[in-house]
Amino acid sequence: MRRPLTSTTASLVVIAAVLAGTLVTYAFRSDTPPNALDIVLPFLASAATLARHRYPITALIIVAASVAAYYPWARLDGPLIMLVFVALYTAADRGALTAAIAAGAALLLGMGLGESGGVRHVDDSLFVAVAGWVVAAIAFGGVTRNRRAYLLEAERRAADAEHSKEEEARRRESEERLRIARELHDVLGHNISMINVQAAAALHGLKKRPEDAERALRTIKDTSKETLRELRTTLGVLRQVDEDAPTAPADSLARVDALVATSGLEVRTELSGPLDAVPTEVDLAATRIIREALTNVSRHSGTTKATLAIANTSGNIMIRVEDDGPGATYDGGSGFGLQGMRERAAALGGTLEAGPRPEGGFRVLARLPLNLPSNGAT
């Protein structure tokens, strides 16, 4: 990691101060000629200080050794010990906390043993001051390292949170696309299938039975109008424009007769239990399943008759749609219609079964719980 410019500037300022202090000491002690250590050790310690960011432990050893040799054997008494504090701080800041503590302890121990003889070079107050600076340098280095690690962790967590938020947004977007596709399939697939069936009936009976053709054309008109209304409602939600809400009532189990009337089939209905206070999610899913099931009867069964049974019992809405037509070959229910019905039931914590009846024809059985799970949705 590239070190900031201010750190390098601070190092140069400290080194300049040490060298300047050495020169000032020489100026005030002109009667004491310097030896080689007075010249070599300050420059050696200064060079090691400049390299402390890349080699913190090596720089600490060199600076500590230079200071240890400087004060007993050099003739001048410059402020070279300042470089030890810098090296101790850098070692702790770079993660070499053990090495910094060991070097600081060795420095203080050496000073204490060196002053145990007859000659005292460092009095007690100065020793305490040096010990305080050693502890402060190591502690400050550890604090700055911990703070830097905390900031990096905070940045990582923020990046992870942002990534998770983007993933959640993409997931919700995908789920919304699937929901819209399912809505359009349920609405358009049902109504257009009705239009196709009724148009074929009108063409077939146009000459032989005009009254049947007229009835089929009226059904086509009503169904196409309903299709346009449903499509306009769905696209209006997608556009999010300021439009008046549709005035036609939405499909509901409470108006199941109107729902059946648009199927173009002769449907025998069997109703049991109250159907006018069903939760909105369950009501919508039930009407969509009924629409799709009746559409499949019109398209695939080969008959114009069906049975629809709806019961509100034991905390569930039970739906049964069946016919007795010869039908087409059952492919295991891999089509979009049956798949969409199963997804609607599963989203509410319910089930849906579909397949041929033993006595002939086809049956769809759905169970939708009235007590929705916490994540229940359509």
Image: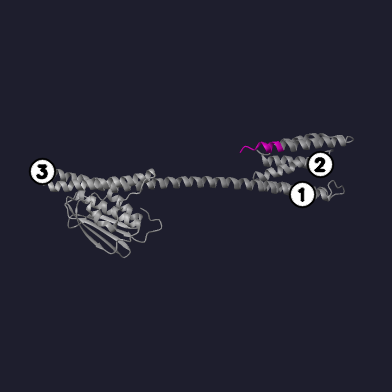
Residue lying furthest left:
208
Give residue 219's position: percent from left, percent from top: 20, 48
CA gap, disc 3 and disc 2: 124 Å
Give residue 209's position: percent from left, percent from top: 11, 47
Q: Secondary structure at mark 2?
A: helix
Q: Is residue 311 left or right of residue 245?
A: left
Which residue position holds label 3?
207
Which residue position holds label 2?
71
Task: Tell me the amino acid under the disc marked 3.
Answer: Lys
Q: Tell me, yes or no, whether the highlighted magenta stretch contains residue 333.
A: no
Q: Is residue 87 left or right of residue 367?
A: right
Which residue position holds label 1?
131
Task: Tell me the amino acid under the disc marked 1.
Answer: Ala
Residue lying furthest right:
31
Give residue 157's position: percent from left, percent from top: 54, 47
- Crowdedness near tag 3: few (<14), some (14–19) or many (≥20) residues, C-alpha within 10 Å: few
Residue 93 visible in rendering: yes
CA gap, disc 1 and disc 3: 114 Å
CA gap, disc 1 and disc 2: 16 Å
In front of the other: 95 or 361: 361
Q: Secondary structure at mark 3?
A: loop
The range drawn in magenta is: 1-10
Q: How is the image coloured?
A: one colour
In front of the other: 27 or 168: 168
Q: Residue at coordinates 28% horizontally, 59% vertically from top-left?
A: 254
Closer to us: mark 1 or mark 3?
3
Q: Main secondary structure of the magenta part?
A: helix
Task: Tell me the amino acid under the disc marked 2.
Answer: Tyr
Closer to us: mark 3 or mark 2?
3
Q: Residue at coordinates 32% horizontally, 54% vertically from top-left?
A: 284
